[in-house]
Amino acid sequence: MEALYQTELHPRDSQSTSERLRFDTCISRRCSVVDPYTLREMTDTRTPRADDAPPYRYTARLADEIEQRWQDRWEQERTFWTPNPTGPLSEGFERVDDRTKLYVLDMFPYPSGAGLHVGHPLGYIGTDVYARFMRMTGRNVLHAMGYDAFGLPAEQYAVETGQHPRVTTDQNIATMRRQLRRLGLGHDPRRGVSTTDVRYYRWTQWIFLQMFNAWYDDEQDRARPIDELVGELDAGTRAAPRGRPWSELDAWERRTVVDTFRLAYLDEVAVNWCPALGTVLSNEEVTAEGRSDRGNHPVYKRPLKQWMLRITTYAQRLLGDLDLLDWPESIKIMQRNWIGRSEGADIVFPVEGHEDLGIRVFTTRPDTVFGATYMVLAPELDLVDEIVANEWPRDTPLEWRGTFGIDVSPVEAVEAYRNFAAEKTDLERQAEGREKTGIFIGAYAIDPVNDERIPIFIADYVLAGYGSGAIMAVPGQDQRDWDFAEEFDLPIIRTVQPSADFDGQAYLGEGPAINSGFLDGLKVDDAKRKIVEWLEETGKGVGAVTYKLRDWLFSRQRYWGEPFPIVYDETGLPVALPESMLPVELPEMTDFQPRIVPDDEETLPEPPLARADDWVTVEADLGEGTKTYLRETNTMPQWAGSCWYYLRYLDPTNENRVVEPDVERYWMQGDTRSGGVDLYVGGAEHAVLHLLYARFWHKVLYDLGHVSTPEPFARLFNQGTITAYEYLDERGVYVPAHEVEERDGRFFFEGKEVIRQQGRMGKSRKNAVAPDDIYAEYGADTLRLYEMFMGPLDASRPWNTADIIGVHRFLQRFWRNTVDEETGATRVSDALADEETRRVLHRTIDAVRTDMAKLQFNTAIARLFELNNRLTAVVGDTGAAPLEVVSAMTLMLAPLAPHLAEEVWARLGRAESLAYESFPEADPDYLVVEEVEIPVQVDGKVRARVKVPAGASEAEHEAAARGDERIAAILDAVDVLKVIVVPGRLVNFVTR
RNA sequence: GCCCGGGUGGCGAAAUUCGGCAAACGCGAUGGAUUCAAAAUCCAUUGUCCGAAAGGACUUGCGGGUUCGAGUCCCGCCCCGGGCACCA
C-alpha cells in the first residue's frame, strides 16, 4: 500500500484526457493554465469577481484555502483512522469501545487513466455524508476506498502507450487518490487496498485454493474440505461415482475422480472467444447480441479447457438467501431471474432399439406428457451420436432429412446440421427471428405414459446447456414446439382444454386436461402433482428442479490479472501449490500483448504468460519428490479481486490470514438479518455479475469457516447516474458541450445548429464536467452539497452547472451569518434564540436526522436552507446569530460540507475536529404544536382555512369550521348531508 | 415478447409510510431596496387560465373506475429508462 503513496507523478509526465479537457475549458473561459494537480496557480488568478469581494467572503478562494487546510489536518491528525478491536490497527479502540460498529462500503473504482468527472463521485459523496452522520450519532464507522486495478482496460492502455500496466496502474491510482482527497472524503487511508498489490492478490490466490481444495456435500448442503471427501472414499463410507470401486483405482484414476468434485475444476467447454480482446469471456460478459460486453466485439464459441467455479451448487442458497437481504427489489428480481429456478420433472424416454438407453428430459409441464409427439435433442449432444440411425427409416418424409442432399445418410445429415448450427452466431439467430430448423436423426423414442412411438430430432432451438439438453416436444402447449411441428408437419395433440379461441397457436393457460388418460379433467396443478406421483411410482421419472445459472468460467488469456496458484505435472493433471508457495507473482514481461488474429476464426487464444519461459517451468517438491512442473498460464478474471475486497479492508496488513476472525466478526456481524456490510453503495450495473460472484465466494468462505456471516452485504443501495446535455451535429457526431451556444432555445456550435439531448456523462460524449472546474468556481463543499441536493441519491438526474449557484449561495449566507465578511470576526451571540426560531431549529433537527438516516439528503438540505433563511432574518434583526442555532446548524452541516463546518466550529472556539461530536438532538418540547391550521372543504374543494388547537375533538373541529364566515355563508345555501373530520388534517362538508 | 423502474410548474425537484391543503427547497424570471452605475446582497411576486379586485375555474402522461376526498388505490392504454430473451 505504501507504494501507492510513493508514486508521485510529475504533472507533465502524461496529460490525461480530462486534463486536456480542463485545459480546453480554461482556454474557453480565458483563465490561465494551471498545475492540474495542486491547483495553486488557478486559485490565485481566477475569478476576477472574487478580487473585489470582501476579504472574508466565502468565495472559491476562501473555500479552497479552508478545504486544503482541513484535508491536511485530517490527514495529520489521522481523524478517520478507524480502530479495529484487536490487531495492528487497534490503536485507540478503547475510545470507541462503547460504540456500535457500522461498515459503510462503496463499490471500489477502477482507476482508469481518464480521470474523474463530476458524475463519478456521486455515490462516494453519499456514503461519506452517511458515514460522517452516523459517526456523529455514536457509531464506530468503517469507511475506506480501495482500487480494482487488474483487468482489460489497464492492459489495453498499457499496450497503447507502451508502458507496463503496473506503471500506468500505479499512476492512475495516485491520481485518483488525489482527486478523491480533494472531495474531502473521510476514508481510513490504511485500508485502501489495490487488487494488483501482491500482498492483496496473494490472498485472492489463497481463496482460489480454498475452492480447489473443497467440494460440495449435497447432503449437508455446504462446501467441505476435499480431504474429508478423500477420507470418506478411502474409508468406504462413500461410494466412488461411475462404476468401479475406489479400492480398485490407481492413484491417477483417483485424482481424476476427486478432481470432478472440486469447486474449482478444469473443463473443456465451449467458451466465448473474443479475438478482438484476445481472451475468452464469461457468459455474463457477453451481450444478448453475442458480442463482448466491453468493446462490443464479435464473440465466437470455441472448445477450450478452462477453469470453472462450481457456482451452480450454490444456486438454491443464492436464491433463498436473497430473502434475508435489504436490497432493492429490482436487483433481487434480476438475481432471481439470472439464477432462473424452474420446478418440474425429469422424465426418461426409452429409445427404440437401445434397451440400455433412455433420454432424460426436463419439463416444467409434466402434465402435458400425453401430448408429446416428438423429441428434440440439442445438436452438439454426444448422445446424438449413440442413437443416430445408420439409414433412414423407410417412410421418413423427405423434408425431415434436411436440405443437405438427397443421398446423405442420417449420420452425414447430423454432421451437416451441426456445422450449419455452429456457424450461426447468436446475432444471426436473432436476425432470423424464431424460425425453426432441425433434422430427424432416424431414431424413435417411446412415450413412457402411452407407449406412443415418437420421432427424435435435433434442432438448435434446444440448448445443450440447459436441463439435459433434450426435450419432449408438446406442440399443443408450447409455442416453440408448435412452430417446429408446423414446419415439419408433425402431429399436434392438445392436452389442456383451451379457454378461448386458440386456433393456430399453443395454449399455455389454465384448463382441464384432455386426451391425457388418467389425468383427464384435472386442473394443471393437480395434473402435475398426479403425474409426478405416477412417474415416481413407476420409476419413469422424478420431480426435479433446474436452474438457468451456469458454472462460472474463470480463466482469461490475459497478462494483467492474478496468476493461478496451480501447476501441471507430467500427466497433465493440475496440482495446487501449497500455501507456503504463495504468492505466485506475475512475472515481469515486456511483451504482454495477447496474440490477436481477428480475421482468423480458427485461432485459439494464447495466454501471454505462456511466453514467460523461465516462469512457466517450476522445480518443486509437491509431495512426490522434486519434479518439473508447468505453471497454469491463464489468469483470473477481473471479478476475482472484487469478490472479497470488503474483507481485506477489515485487516489489510494481515500476513497470516485473509482476515483475523475477531476483526471479521466485529465488523461483519450486526443486527441485520444476514450480517455483513451495513451499507453497500454502487451502480445497478453490477446487479448480477459482481454481486452474484461476491455472494458466492462469501458463501464458500462461510462454509469453510473463514467468515462468520452467510451473506457479505446486508443492505444495498444503488446510486443513480448523473446525466448531462450532449450535442450532436448534423452528422450525428458529438460536439464539445461547453462550446455550444444557446440562442432562443436553439443550440449552435461554430455557427451551425446542433441538437441537444440528455445522456450519460462521459468524455466520448464530450459532455464531461471536470470536478476541478467546479472547485475553481465554488469549492469542494459546494460540489458535494450540489450533488446531494439535486435529487434523491438513487435517481438519475441531469447535471446543470447553472443550478450550483443556489447551494453555493446557501453556504455563503450561512458563513456570513456567522463570520463578518470584512473583519473575519465571528458574529455569534450568547443570547438565546427567540421561541419561534428555536422551534424552527428543533423541527429542523428532527427532520434532518430522519432524512439523513434514510439517505434522503436532498430534503435534509432543503430543511437546512429553511433554517438558514430563518437565521438570516434573525441576524438581520439583531445583528448577531444565536450560538445555539449556529452550533447546531454547523454540526448538521458537517456531514454535507465538512470543511466549512470544521472551519466555523474552530472559529466558535473549538479545538477538536467535529467529526466525533454528537449530532444535535431535537428537544421534544419544541416539536409540539399548539395550534394547527387546517383546510375546510365543501364537497372536496378547499373554501377556507381555520385554526384549531392541537388535539381538539371532532366536534371542536366542526365548530371551528362552521365558525368561519365564508363557510357559514356557503353552508347557508345548501344542505349538509355529512361532515368528514380528520382531526388535525381537515374538515369536509358533503352537500351532495 | 417478458420482467422491473419512472412520467408532477420554464428547469432540478417536494408530497407516495397509512388516500386528506399539490408544487416544500433551489435555479430561472419579474418587480423593488441599495449603488453614480454595475456586480454582490436584501425584500417581494412567480402552476395555468378568467378577473381591476374580491374571487372563480382548471391542473400531477392519456382514458375509465372506487371514494366525502385520488399525484397516491383499481382497470385499460401511451411514452421514457433499465434488465432478460428459443431456458422446455
Image (tube, coloured by chain):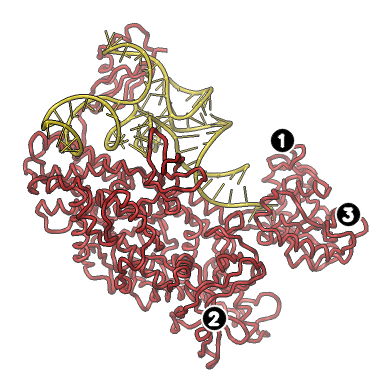
Chain colours: A red, B yellow
Q: Nearer the viewer, mark 1 or mark 3?
A: 3
State which chain disc 1 sits on: A
The label shown at residue A611 is 2
Which structural element holds mark 2? helix
Which one is earlier in the sequence, the residue at label 1 or at label 3?
Answer: 3
Which one is earlier in the sequence, the residue at label 2 or at label 3?
Answer: 3
Q: In what quadrant of the picture does the C terminus of chain A appear?
A: top left
Residue that mark 1 sits on: A499
State which chain disc 2 sits on: A
Q: Nearer the viewer, residue A272 or A923?
A: A272
The vertical placement of A846 against A962, above or below, is below
Instruction: Determine the residue positioned at 38% across, 32% down.
Output: A744
Q: CA distance from mark 2 to mark 3?
A: 53 Å
Q: CA distance from mark 2 to mark 1?
A: 66 Å
Instruction: Determine the residue positioned at 22% across, 48% down.
Output: A47
Query: Is A553 left, or right, of B24 in this rendering?
Result: right
Which one is earlier in the sequence, the residue at label 2 or at label 1?
Answer: 1
Label 2: how many Cα within 10 Å (few below 14, some 14–19, many 20+): some
Residue that mark 3 sits on: A398
Which structural element holds mark 1? loop
Label 3: how many Cα within 10 Å (few below 14, some 14–19, many 20+): few
Whether residue A54 can be seen here: yes
Q: In what quadrant of the picture does the N terminus of chain A appear?
A: bottom left
- Determine which quarter of the picture holds residue A325: bottom left
Which structural element holds mark 3? helix
Q: Nearer the viewer, mark 2 or mark 3?
A: 2
